[in-house]
Amino acid sequence: MLETIKETVSFIKNKANFEPEIAIILGTGLGSVVDDIKIESEIKYTDIPNFPVSTAPGHKGKLIFGYLGGKKVMALQGRFHYYEGHSMEKLTFPIRVMKFLGIKYLFISNASGGVNPDFEIGDLMIINDHINQMPNPLIGKHYDELGDRFPDMSQAYNKSLITKAEEIARAENIKVQKGCYVGVTGPTLETPKEYSYFRIIGGDAVGMSTVPEVIVAHQMGIPCFAISIITDLGVPGRIVEVSVEDVQKAASEAAPRMVTIMEKLIETLD
């Protein structure tokens, strides 16, 4: 794996000629966040050696390099999901590459279903913990160069970044929730009983991404900050049939508020 990572990193460095400080992963319906980035260069996933290709609706499949909040950022305009048939190693490969490119922080966004009865569609939820219902991406051959074999996950979501984000939200009069994200394989949306189960075990929102990326980033020592946009509700009495288009629409409508928090949070970073 190490040689594969180095090959990909070398290609990106030569192609982009850019040294990112912060990486941003854009979830379903959130590709428009790129509009706020002062773009210097971009690379299609299909042009990058060893890189996975995103097939999920609303994921354009580009690496974007530029400036946001006065900092050098790289953005994944389109992420990868286990349900697309990627192995966990392949799905999280971009995180390994970003670390070797020199990123110091990872920002993650996603669209998710709310199971907390206090949530509304369009709410922003800052993730402070997760429950993993997918295969663990660290299963398999271990490489000491990539981090600990048994990483502690008690602070997978950086508390300092969460505190700063909450302060920014208050100052900008943006409503935010905070809670636990349950990561599932998909691609089916949940049954009513599954929604109830995820709430019982401690979840506030459920989705099909983020957790593998955070596990790998945390193993490699990258501080993580993640936000979910609640695009549908899995709350008894409020569950309705939902389409991918509904999710994308709800996510895109809430995206500007999420961008405000992320951009101002990035501005505070050293």
Image (cartoon, rainbow, N blue to C red):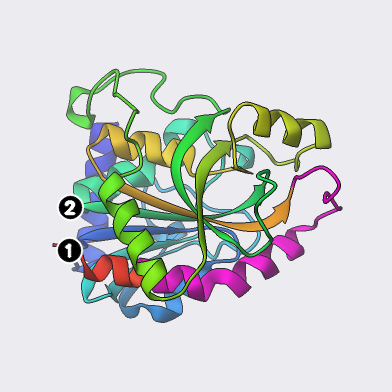
Position of residue 156 measured from the top left corner of the image (x, y, whole percent)? 34, 36
Residue ID at (41%, 76%): 172
Which numbered tag is attached to residue 102?
2
Q: Position of residue 53 (x, y in %)?
A: 51, 51
Check disc 2 and give the amino acid type: Gly
Compared to residue 57, the image places residue 195 above or below, namely above
Task: Of the two numbered discs 1 and 2 on the same chain, state the one appearing first in sequence.
Answer: 1
Residue at image location 52% in from the left, 40% down from the top: 180
1 and 2 marks in contact (CB < 8 Å)? yes
Q: Taking 148 as reference, is 119 left or right?
A: right
Is the N terminus in the top left, top right, bottom left or bottom right quadrant?
A: top left
Name the residue rendered at 54%, 44% in the picture: 209
Residue 92 in sight: no
Reply above or below: 220 against 240: above
In the image, residue 199 lies in the stretch drawn in magenta: no
The kind of secondary structure element at disc 1 is loop
Q: Secondary structure at mark 2?
A: loop
Residue beneath the point at 22% across and 38% down: 221
| Residue 229 in view in this figure | yes
Tell me the magenta residue range: 234-262
Residue 249: within the magenta? yes
Place residue 129 in its image quadrant. top left
Residue wearing tag 1: 19
